[in-house]
Image (cartoon, rainbow, N blue to C red):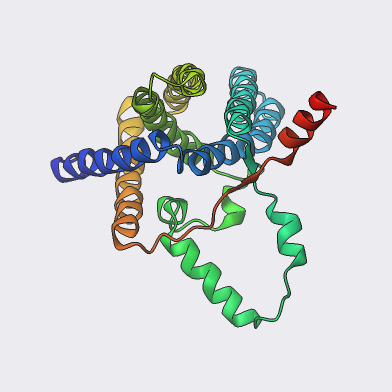
Amino acid sequence: MNLLTYMMHLAGSGASAYFSALQIRDIKTRPNILAGFQLAESGSVPFLTNLSQRAAQEGDTWLAEKLRLHAEDEKRHGQIFAHALKQLDKKVRDFKSQSSNKSEDKSESNTGEKKSKQRGNSFFGTYYEGYEGEQLKAECIDWNVFMASTYILELDASKDFARMAKALPEDDSKARNLKLGMLNIAEDETTHAAYLYEAMHRRMSAIQVQQLVDEWRSRKVNAITTYVTNKLKGTDNAPSLTEDDKSSEKEAELVIA
């Protein structure tokens, strides 16, 4: 990593950490960021499970077991965030049912243009720029691409979760429980980064590993820069990821009855 990339990494990570700490500390914005984490962690489980099966089929039993454990961790992480949301009487919004109830009166070209803009403005759209969706599926993703890109994400996530945990207030029992959960998740992410780093060294020389890591670090810097720029410009107008959890109200009614 050259000096410029390193400085941009520090600046981008600092800005991203600042935004995340503000969002998770504020009780009004906390549900939305928790929902985003729940979707990301739970959503990765099928991908990692399929990768584990693929590794086993290719005869790499060591990697298959690491990926299986990784998938189990991500499932548990999703449950931690889901529980934290439930304590706030919130849950992840059911986008599928809502989208099916909306009228489809917009032209196909306008919809495609909108999706293209969203991909161009998204973090992952920038991070994986140059790769098509089919290339990133578990069945065919290049192992080096998976290992290096995920290593960077897991390594940084371990630090980000720890920072956000420290930003949570101490005078709230729900926040304290969430803090403990996030610190535990941060430890898991460190473990994930470690096995991915080892996996790369099992497949290539130390020089090749460093070159690959530097490439994906640069991609992460560019993606973070895009993300922070959109935040500052106010162009990151993503919809709310949460809705009220009616089950909590029903449980309260049953207790009263």
Q: Give me the residue at 56% from left, 40% from top.
A: 35
Can you name the residue that lies furthest to the front here? 256
Q: Is residue 208 left or right of residue 102?
A: left
**From the viewer's perspective, is residue 197 above or below residue 29?**
above
Can you name the residue that lies furthest to the right here? 257
Quarter of the N terminus within the rendering: top left
Quarter of the C terminus within the rendering: top right
Residue 165 in the image: state x and y as whole percent.
Answer: 40, 24
**From the viewer's perspective, is residue 122 above or below residue 202?**
below
Q: Give me the residue at 40% from left, 38% from top.
A: 26
Count of labels in the image:
0
Residue 127 in the image: state x and y as whole percent.
Answer: 41, 50
Residue 99 in the image: state x and y as whole percent.
Answer: 71, 63
Considering depth in this image, is 179 or 192 the residue closer to the camera?
A: 179
Residue 247 in the image: state x and y as whole percent.
Answer: 75, 36
Q: Is residue 58 left or right of residue 156?
A: right
**From the viewer's perspective, is residue 69 above or below residue 2?**
above
Q: Give me the residue at 69% from left, 25% from top.
A: 56
Q: Picture quarter containing residue 237?
A: bottom left
Considering depth in this image, is 182 or 196 the residue closer to the camera?
A: 182
Considering depth in this image, is 137 or 39 the residue closer to the camera?
A: 39
Q: Give me the residue at 36% from left, 51% from top.
A: 223
Considering depth in this image, is 237 or 254 the residue closer to the camera?
A: 254
